[in-house]
Image (cartoon, rainbow, N blue to C red):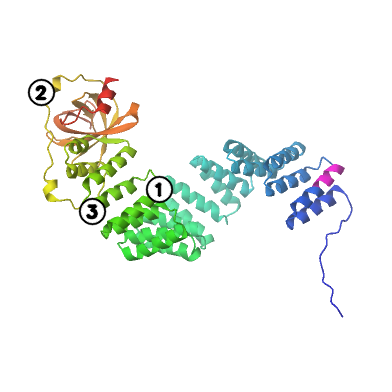
Amino acid sequence: MKREQWVPRVHVVGSSPQARLGLAVTHAKSGNYQRALDECRAALYTNPRKADVHLTMATLYTALERYEEAIESCRSALNLNPKLYQAYLISAHIHKMQGRIPEALEASRLAVQIDPENFYSYLLLGELTLHEKLYDDATEAFFAALKYNPQLEMAHYKLANIFQQRDQEDRAIAEVEAALELNPAVARSQMLLGDLLMAQGEYEAALARYREAVQVSPYLAEAHAKVGAAYLQLGLQHEALQALRMALLLNPKMAEAHLDLGKIYLSLKKASMAQREYQAALELNSQLIEGYTGIGDSLILEGKYEEAVAVYQKALRITKTYCLKGEHYVSQGEYISAIVEFRNTLNLISKIQLPETEAGKLIPLRPRTSGERRQNERFLIRMPVDVREGTANYAPAVTLDVSLGGMLLETPWDLPVGAEVEVITPLIEHDRKIALPAKVVRLERSAMKGRYRPALELLSGQLESSEWRNFLEK
């Protein structure tokens, strides 16, 4: 006997609005959104004041990406029943997708007011306030979401992100560990914990987390790139090379992975291969300072000093810094000396081998004569600057007065008389910075306790740069 194939069918039981709504839900569950909308319209034809039908239509329009009609259905539902918090949540979700964050925030806050124990309302409010960098509000919202649903792995993960942004690493680690306890098979949480451990110098522990992320998501390029970065910090170049190649095989548009690969080739003295990777990074992001400095360093390996100078100058232009001393050496054709100054100004700590015969040709800049100093008009200008002595780190200071040939600073530390320093001065009107070499000629104690007033004399060379002169004349 031939067996008949059984096919489930939807039978209409009555034609009341509630029955039509039931049919609409059944069609929606099977993915037949248009049939579901037809049933909703039939229900509203019989009773146009059924708020739950309007709400169902809003969800259907959202699924069909007909967002304006979805918003209109939400409005209709709320006009009939202002307590339908789901309508506010749908509206907030749509506004968020369309980038209308203020409207999304307003809708999500109204949803919380109507149902203050609904965890999803708090979760959405937390995401929106986090997007706006309202960290206190976002923290409060995510903790509220966890109060009503302690199993929300996402809320712990978002809290970890907030604490990371606020440099509260211990709290960030605690939250991401809580997220992983709820669900260890989430690559993003494994990577975040790895990032936090990397920031603390725990490279081996970070590597273990990144490898867990790869185990969970073997085709996630970012996870492989982070494995490579951790290996690089541990000095395991071969392993780093393999991981970074895999990352770029999965996603060749990862600028940071190209930079790390460039560092490896540079350390192996493979200049052309390093340049290729640094250039690939710059094609993805033309503002990456490390891309330019990496190319500059690789050109030095090839003995192309003049070309290296040009690349370092590009890096300085991006940072909007003018290295006066370095430009002086360029004008004299002393490219090695210029490279030393440019690299110092860019705070490059990696060691580069430079020819001793050239490096010994640094031309010392001389102090100005008293007659030259008196010729310069002084201006009472208070502006923030950064100062450093030798190769130390830059420290903040404030100018009290400046001239073309010198300046008086106020600093929280003393500078020894006779010390040569470098001052990074922002040229506010030109949105640029200029590096000025100077010598401490006098040191006084400020009237304010713990403050000092060093008088600096700018060293002559090409001090009358157009940027500095134009700034003072204005």
* Front one among 356 and 190: 356
Residue at image location 62% in from the left, 49% down from the top: 120
Identify residue type, mark 2: Ser
User: Does residue 225 show up?
Assistant: yes
Which stretch appears magenta? 40-46
**Separation (CA) of disc 2 from disc 1:** 50 Å
Q: Is 41 colored magenta in this rendering?
A: yes
Task: Quadrant for the C terminus, please.
Answer: top left
**Side of 450 relative to 149 (left or right):** left
User: Does residue 201 show up?
Assistant: no
Which quarter of the figure has residue 367? top left
Position above or below: 405 against 315: above
**Side of 311 relative to 368 (left or right):** right
Q: Position of residue 384 (x, y in %)?
A: 29, 30
What residue would you read off at disc 1?
A: 283
Mark 2 vs 3, N-terminal side: 3
Q: Secondary structure at mark 3?
A: loop
